[in-house]
Image (cartoon, grey):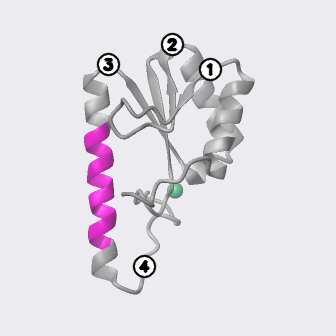
Amino acid sequence: MKGVRQKDTAPEVAVRRCLHAHGLRYSLHRRDLPGRPDIVLPKRRTVVFVHGCFWHAHDCAHGTVAAKRNADFWAEKLSANRARDLRVQEQLRRQGWHVEVVWECQASDRAYLGTLTRRLLSR
Ligand SMILES: [Zn+2]
């Protein structure tokens, strides 16, 4: 998936800003963890992935837009991405991590981020 993952995307920055504003401290893109999670909160034993709706095949309007050219290629690629995400999440859970996924379409939703933040603060 080289070239697919971008760092510091707008949704990612929005999530980080919210966590930081509530006193949560994290590290970024830890290479030593499966899937290199976008945000890692060691004290809360939690990792957060901020997923683009298209690339990670979210079940929302942005994620289900069919790529018209090379439809078969995209269907295969996106379902492989999705399978990989689930495998990585499973590995992390087995290592004792809580796994949170914030979809791109949720990252600008303050109420959603507020709920996530409260959940993290309670760990
Ligand atoms: Zn979405």
Residue 23 position in % (x across, y down):
70, 18
Span shown in magenta: 75-88
* Amino acid tagged 3: Gly
Tags 1 and 3 touching, CB below 8 Å: no
Identity of the residue furthest to the bottom in this view: 69
Measured Cα–Cα span from mark 3 to mark 4:
37 Å
Q: Is residue 61 left or right of residue 69?
A: right
C-alpha distance separating marks 1 and 4: 38 Å
Q: Assign a secondary structure to mark 4.
A: loop
Q: Secondary structure at mark 2?
A: helix
Query: Which is more N-terminal, label 4 or label 1?
Result: 1
Q: Is mark 4 within 8 Å of ligand 1?
A: no
**What amino acid is at disc 1?**
Arg
Question: Which element is circle 3 on?
Answer: loop
Numbered badge on residue 25: 1
Residue 3, labelled with which disc?
none
Q: Residues within 10 Å of mark 1 (few under 14, many from 20)?
A: some
- Write down the residue under mark 4: 67
Residue at mark 2: 43
Q: Which mark is residue 96?
A: 3
Labels 1, 3: front one: 1
In the rendering, at what x and y percent does residue 44 appear?
Answer: 49, 15
Circles 2, 1 touching at the beta carbon (< 8 Å): yes
x and y percent of residue 74 in the render? 34, 74
Above/below status of 81 relative to 115: below
